[in-house]
Structures are given as structure tokens and as C-alpha cells.
């Protein structure tokens, strides 16, 4: 009789699928019904899912390859990885109110619904397909007894039986575990009593030679290959977390039950490794995957234990997968979310259950899932890894909100995460990369295409805020490097909403791609103030939708200029300080005095300044051509380290050229001179040097002009925007208004703060 039926890939995925055990009821807590304690609700289902099929069929083979000490090393290393994950999971559930979905709930409450969904969707798929894998495993064991029974008939009957049990109620399925756990316990006793009918083996191999397996004709193996085959045997640690809605006290039950189950199962595995070494010869351990059945005192008990392990895991997965689907629908992550999130009178997610049933039936018809079995294994491992990552982030942030009653060293989640990713690439590096890519693609999709909202916060903002605070501390210890780190962080005062709307495109073009916008609202009129409180955040959101950081605040003051002056001084004490004041010149000439004062104050407080003068008829035109006006008064300036007065002009021209993909013209104004060729030559030399040191694009065209403004405007190319340097001691808004009419285009006046350097 052919005894080898289950393949390695089957076993890996089948055992991995047990990681979620019997799941939680929908919602965070059941308001009615039976509540379970630590032993019944956590310890028993966790131990049942860990003590699975690999213990029976691959445990002896591991000892045959690695020897007793090598097998204990493999068991210890594998258990250490899942034990760290169990510690991380136990710690996090003592800090949150875990809801439906198990790992999905944990990850969502920390990293947001997008991350939770990116893990939850593959986890659901893996859980659903795992049902079919378990059914196939059950069939292989059944055919060991009845080899003539048709495979398809066994699969269909097995699944029908599982379906009927799960369809009755979750509580009924939960009670089945006692009988199965008893059978598994008796099967281990039967194996231990095998010495009654079998002589004790004295040829103990403490350190193995890694001969390989029947599949590769014993052509050789190594420690990591054997480790990869055995690792799924130690999974199944999340059964308790998924029962959280049915527990008396999840924060107490889950840590105690999970860790106790992991510890006990480790002792069982180590004991089994020593036991089989004395029960069978090394050659028998290598060649016969069913050696435990052959050597047991009562073989049918061992076979019943093997069948019970696969049957219970299939039942757990069929009950668990709909709970994950329910949680995804409840959070509007999938399609038909309202349907998926519905429950019957007993709180059972029947629609999700029947939907999962259809998927399982389709997977059963595929007949062979070996091709995707490793991928399913990776999805479970990624879930474990993310549980560790969540705790690592939460603990690393050091926020007051993370105060679990079960505290663990930060090294635990770090080693757990590293271990999970390590095992992924040990098992199959290619499939590991594919699975990670699929999860990342799902995350990007949910981030870009879904508007996911939750009534509860997560740690993402805190994570980035802590990172920013850490960066601020580091930066404060370093020498200032504002010149190299310059980017336009705009401070935009607004006395009404139209002040921002009128200049929206200009502000947007100046702030992107890496700048920021801070809008300060000033309004004396109560009605206008109420309007601005509503509209300014909306305008700020428009910037945010374009990936430009934007914030807004209302300033309660009756004196606009004084209030703005105080705001600029206060903002200098912040870390993310705006560096450039943005003002817009309107038809309200009575505001000219305020604008003049604010520009002068900006320079005094270390701010640069933009003064935007929109041309009403065409605005920014086609946004294809920019003229940068440079007034060359001293061509003998030292350009070795810096250039005076025109740094912001040069930087802005370059920025807008990039954003618009525009043509840039440098309009260089020289003095009238009798010795015109000499003057022009000196100016040309200076500009050539400036272009090189300031890294101005080589396609920029240079135009040398002299004469009045009206004369020069006539001879230079027409532009959509003219950029002109401005100095604080020479601000004449009346002249600027006239210049706008001469140019017949929008103008952007710039004033250096003293901290910019176009040559840096």
C-alpha cells in the first residue's frame, strides 16, 4: 500500500492556515450568550490548531534528517519566532479593544484601515483556500484506510459535513474541539505506548546527516530546508485573539491562554522528537512518513488524531474566514459591504458565510492547490510579521496611549518581525517577494481608491509626529543648513476668503512639490469670520489633495498688521517654520500701507516675501514662459559663495520653470554707458558665471537691455509671468501698480530673507 500521500507544500499551507483558529463573533463584544474563559476560549483552540498534521507526518522525518539535537534546535528556533509573535499579539490586545477580524482589527487600530485591509484581504483569501487544503489533507488520510474511495466524493462529503456543523452555529462548532483535542491526546498516548510492541531503538542519531526525502530520492538536504518544512507546525497562535468577542476578559484570557498553549505544545514537540528517536531507526524515520501510525500501540487512534487535526482546522477556517470578510465589509473595504456586514438573529454573518462557502467549493473543484499553497503560507506569515511590526511601532513611539498591561522588551517584536520575514524567504524567496508585492499593491489601491474612515483613531499621525519630533531634535543639534534645505514654505495671510482663492494657482505652483502652505485668517466682521472658519479649511484641503502640506488657523485680533506681525514672530519659534510671506496686491489701494509694512516686517523677522500682482485680464496666461529680471548694478561682485538680493528670484524662477515645464528668459538690465561694449562684456561674463554657479538650465535665454521700462518691455519676449527683485527699503506700490499696466502680465516680486542662497 502506498503510504506517502500528503505533499510538503500541502502540509505547509494546511498547517499555516490554522493560525486563526475559531474566530470571534462580529463586533467587539457579545451582549448575550455564553462567555468563555482562558482554558475553554483560548488555550484549547490554540493548542488544537498548533498540534496539527505535520506533527504526525513530518516530525519523525525531521528527526531522521537533523538528528535529535538538530530536531530540537529546529523546534526551538521555529517556536521562538512564533512565541515572540504570540508575546507581541498578547501585549497589543492588552492595550486595545480588539474587534471582529482578529489580525485585521489589531493592524487597523494601529496602522489604519488601509494597512488593515491590505493584510485582511489576503488573509481572508488564504483562510478560505485553506479550507480546501485541509479537506484535501483529510482525504489523503482517509484514503490511507480506504484507498479505493473516490477522491472527489470524499472531498464533497467531508466539506458537506463541515458545512453543516458550521451552519448550525459557531457555538456548536466551538464545542467540537473537546472531542478532537481528546482524540489527539489519546493518539499521543498511543504513540508513547508503542514501546510495548516495538523494541527500543539503540541507534540514536543525535546529529543528522540531512539525507533528504523520498521525493528527491534522498539526494540531500540541509538545516534550513528541513526547518522550512517543519515551521508551519508551530503556527496557530491567533486562535485566542480571534475568539476575543466570546471571552470573559480578553485582556487576561488571550495572553494566559496563548502563551500557555505555545509553551505546552513546545514541550510536546520536543518530547515527541526524543520519543520517536527511541521508537524507530534513523532509516525508518527518513523513509516512512507514517512511522507513527505503524509504531503506535493502537494505530487507529493515531490515524483518528491525524484526521481530527485536519478536520478541526478545516472547520475553524470555514468559521473564521467569514468573520474576516464580515470585518472587511463592516469597514467598507470591499464590495457589497452592507450585505457582508449583516448578521442574523444569532449574530452569525450568514451572507459572508455563504459567500465563503462558494469560494471554497470553487477551490475544491480546482483539485490541486499546490501551485498557490506557498503563496497562502506567505499571507499568514505576513500577518504574523505585521502584528510584530505594530507592537514595534507602538512601543517605539513611546506614546502615553501605549500602556499595555503585558509589557515586553522592544527586542521581542523586532526579533519576531525579522523571524517571520526570514522564514518567508527561507521557504520560497520568489513567492515571498510576490506576496509582499501583492500586499503593497492592495495597500496602494486602498489608499488611492477608497475613502476609508473609522470612528476610532490609529497611530499613524502619532508615528509621523514622533518621527518629526525626533528629526527636530536631531536637526537642532546640527549646524544650521537653511541654504541647502530651502524650499518654499509659504505664510499666507487672508482678510477674506477671496485673498486665497484669487491667488490659489500661484500659491499652488510655488509650494509644489515639497513646500507647504500655512493660511492665517483675519476678519473683524463676525459674519466674514464665520464664513472664513468654514471656507479656509476647505481651501487648505484642496492643497492637501494635491500632496501639498497645508494648515489653517484664525487669528482673533482687531489689528490686522499687528496681529500678523505677532504671528510671524511666534512662528519663528516653531520647528516647521514658514520662510516666505505671500501677499497679493489687489485693487483695494487702502491696503497698500499695510502691505508695505508687512513686507518690511518680513525682512526684519527673517522671512522672504512674495508680492503677487495679478493681471486681471489674463491671470497667469498659458504658464509657458517666464521672464526673470536681473538688475546688474555691480558686475564685479564676488560669486564664490553667495549672490546678493536675487537669491529668491533665481530659486523661484527655477522652481516655476520645473513646475510649468516652461521657457525661462533672463532679462539683464545694464547701465547706460558711453563704453557700451565694455559694459556689455562685463555683464556677459558675470551672467555666464552666475548661470554656472546657480545651475540655471542651459536652455535659458539671456537678453541684455537698457533704457526705460517701456522701452525694454517692447524688446524682450512676452511672458506669462515676470519675476522681479524687490528690496525692503525701496517699496513703492504706486509704481508697482503702474508697472503692471506696462507689462500687461502678472508680476511676482521677490524679496530675500537673507537665508536663501541660490549658489548653495
Image (spheres, helix red, strand yellow):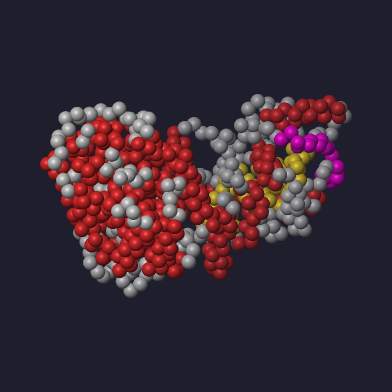
Residue 334 relative to residue 165: left or right: right
Residue 699 belongs to magenta span: yes
Asked if 218 appears above or below 295 in the picture, the reply is above
Which residue, as the protein is rendered here, is positioned at the far left?
Answer: 196
Q: Residue at x 27, y 69 (%)?
A: 31
Q: Quadrant of residue 321?
A: bottom left
Residue 603 at least partly seen? no
Q: Residue at x 27, y 43 (%)?
A: 290
Q: Looking at the figure, which quarter contains the N terminus?
A: top left
Asked if 410 appears above or below 91 in the picture, the reply is above
Q: Residue at x 47, y 39 (%)?
A: 430
Q: Nearer the viewer, residue 736 or 60?
A: 60
Residue 44 relative to residue 580: left or right: left
Counting the numbered discs, the total is 0
Residue 624, given in percent of the width and then of the height, sits at 75, 47
Residue 112 relative to residue 283: left or right: right
Asked if 153 appears above or below 740 in the picture, the reply is below
Please provide the residue range marked out in magenta: 697-715
Q: Nearer the viewer, residue 753 or 562?
A: 753
Residue 76, given in percent of the width and then of the height, sits at 26, 37
Q: Quadrant of residue 696?
A: top right
Residue 638, given in percent of the width and then of the height, sits at 68, 26
Q: Residue at x 32, y 44 (%)?
A: 2
Q: Nearer the viewer, residue 326 or 637?
A: 326
Which residue, as the protein is rendered here, is positioned at the far right?
Answer: 674
Residue 751 at least partly seen? yes
Residue 683 belongs to magenta span: no
Residue 441, given in percent of the width and then of the height, sits at 51, 49
Amino acid at each position: 500500500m502506498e503510504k506517502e500521500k500528503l505533499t510538503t507544500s500541502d502540509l505547509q499551507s494546511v498547517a499555516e492556515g490554522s493560525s486563526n483558529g475559531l474566530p470571534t463573533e462580529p463586533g467587539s463584544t457579545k451582549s448575550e450568550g455564553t462567555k468563555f474563559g482562558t482554558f475553554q476560549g483560548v488555550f484549547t483552540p490554540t493548542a488544537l490548531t498548533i498540534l496539527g498534521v505535520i506533527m504526525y507526518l513530518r516530525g519523525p522525518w525531521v528527526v531522521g534528517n537533523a538528528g535529535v539535537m538538530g530536531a530540537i534546535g529546529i523546534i526551538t528556533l521555529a517556536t521562538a519566532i512564533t512565541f515572540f509573535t504570540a508575546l507581541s499579539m498578547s501585549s497589543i490586545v492588552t492595550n486595545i479593544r480588539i474587534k471582529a477580524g482578529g489580525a485585521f482589527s489589531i493592524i487597523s487600530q494601529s496602522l489604519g484601515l488601509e494597512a488593515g485591509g491590505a493584510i485582511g484581504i489576503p488573509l481572508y483569501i488564504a483562510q478560505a483556500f485553506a479550507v480546501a487544503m485541509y479537506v484535501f489533507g483529510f482525504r489523503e488520510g482517509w484514503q490511507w484506510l480506504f484507498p479505493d474511495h473516490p477522491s472527489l466524493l470524499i472531498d464533497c462529503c467531508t466539506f458537506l459535513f463541515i458545512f453543516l456543523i458550521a451552519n448550525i452555529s459557531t457555538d456548536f462548532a466551538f464545542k467540537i474541539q473537546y472531542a478532537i483535542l481528546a482524540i489527539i491526546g489519546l493518539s499521543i498516548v498511543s504513540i508513547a505506548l508503542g514501546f510495548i510492541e516495538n523494541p527500543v531503538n539503540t541507534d540514536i542519531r543525535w546529529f543528522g546527516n540531512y539525507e533528504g526525502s523520498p521525493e528527491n530520492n534522498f539526494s540531500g538536504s540541509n538545516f534550513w530546508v528541513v526547518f522550512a518544512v517543519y515551521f508551519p507546525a508551530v503556527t496557530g497562535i491567533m486562535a485566542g485573539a480571534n475568539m476575543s468577542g466570546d471571552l470573559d476578559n480578553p485582556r487576561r484570557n488571550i495572553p494566559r491562554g496563548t502563551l500557555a498553549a505555545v509553551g505546552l505544545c513546545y514541550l510536546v514537540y520536543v518530547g515527541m522528537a526524543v520519543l520517536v528517536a527511541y521508537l524507530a531507526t534513523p532509516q525508518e524515520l527518513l523513509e516512512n512518513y507514517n512511522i507513527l501510525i505503524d509504531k503506535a500501540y493502537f494505530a487507529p487512534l493515531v490515524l483518528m488524531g491525524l484526521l481530527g487535526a485536519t478536520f478541526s482546522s478545516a472547520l475553524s477556517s470555514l468559521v473564521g474566514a467569514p468573520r474576516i470578510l464580515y470585518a472587511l465589509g463592516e469597514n467598507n473595504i470591499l464590495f457589497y459591504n452592507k450585505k457582508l456586514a449583516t448578521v442574523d438573529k444569532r449574530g452569525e454573518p450568514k451572507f459572508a458565510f455563504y459567500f465563503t462557502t462558494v469560494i471554497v467549493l470553487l477551490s475544491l473543484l480546482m483539485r490541486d492547490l499546490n501551485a498557490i499553497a506557498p503563496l497562502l503560507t506567505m499571507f499568514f506569515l505576513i500577518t504574523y510579521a505585521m502584528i510584530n511590526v505594530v507592537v514595534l511601532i507602538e512601543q517605539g513611539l513611546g506614546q502615553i496611549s501605549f500602556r499595555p498591561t503585558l509589557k515586553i522588551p522592544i527586542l521581542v517584536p523586532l526579533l519576531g518581525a525579522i523571524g517571520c520575514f526570514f522564514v518567508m524567504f527561507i521557504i520560497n524567496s520568489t513567492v515571498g517577494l510576490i506576496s509582499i508585492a501583492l500586499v503593497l499593491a492592495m495597500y496602494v489601491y486602498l489608499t488611492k481608491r477608497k475613502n476609508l474612515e473609522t470612528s476610532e483613531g490609529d497611530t499613524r499621525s502619532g508615528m509621523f509626529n514622533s518621527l518629526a519630533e525626533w528629526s527636530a531634535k536631531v536637526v537642532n543639534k546640527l549646524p544650521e543648513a537653511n541654504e541647502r534645505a530651502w524650499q518654499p514654505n509659504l505664510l499666507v495671510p487672508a482678510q477674506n476668503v477671496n485673498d486665497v482663492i484669487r491667488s490659489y494657482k500661484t500659491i499652488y505652483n510655488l509650494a509644489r512639490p515639497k513646500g507647504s502652505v500655512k493660511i492665517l485668517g483675519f476678519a473683524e466682521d463676525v459674519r466674514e469670520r464665520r464664513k472664513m472658519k468654514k471656507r479656509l479649511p476647505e481651501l487648505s484641503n484642496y492643497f492637501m489633495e494635491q500632496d501639498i502640506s497645508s494648515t489653517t488657523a484664525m487669528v482673533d485680533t482687531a489689528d490686522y498688521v499687528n496681529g500678523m506681525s505677532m504671528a510671524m514672530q511666534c512662528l519663528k519659534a516653531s520647528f516647521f517654520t514658514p520662510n516666505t510671506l505671500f501677499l497679493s496686491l489687489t485693487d483695494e489701494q487702502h491696503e497698500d500701507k499695510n502691505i508695505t509694512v508687512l513686507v518690511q516686517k518680513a525682512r526684519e523677522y527673517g522671512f522672504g516675501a512674495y508680492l503677487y500682482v495679478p493681471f486681471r485680464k489674463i491671470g497667469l496666461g498659458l504658464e509657458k514662459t517666464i521672464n526673470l529680471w536681473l538688475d546688474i548694478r555691480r558686475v564685479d561682485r564676488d560669486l564664490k559663495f553667495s549672490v546678493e538680493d536675487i537669491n529668491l528670484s533665481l530659486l523661484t524662477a527655477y522652481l516655476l520653470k520645473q513646475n510649468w515645464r516652461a521657457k525661462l528668459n533672463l532679462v539683464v538690465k545694464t547701465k547706460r554707458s558711453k563704453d557700451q561694449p565694455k559694459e556689455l562684456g562685463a555683464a556677459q561674463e558675470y551672467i555666464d558665471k552666475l548661470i554656472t554657479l546657480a545651475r540655471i538650465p542651459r536652455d535659458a535665454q539671456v537678453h541684455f537691455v537698457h533704457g526705460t521700462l517701456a522701452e525694454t518691455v517692447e524688446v524682450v519676449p512676452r511672458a506669462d509671468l515676470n519675476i522681479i527683485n524687490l528690496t525692503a527699503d525701496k517699496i513703492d506700490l504706486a509704481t508697482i501698480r503702474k508697472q503692471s499696466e506696462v507689462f500687461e502680465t502678472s508680476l511676482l516680486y521677490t524679496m530675500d530673507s537673507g537665508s536663501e542662497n541660490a549658489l548653495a
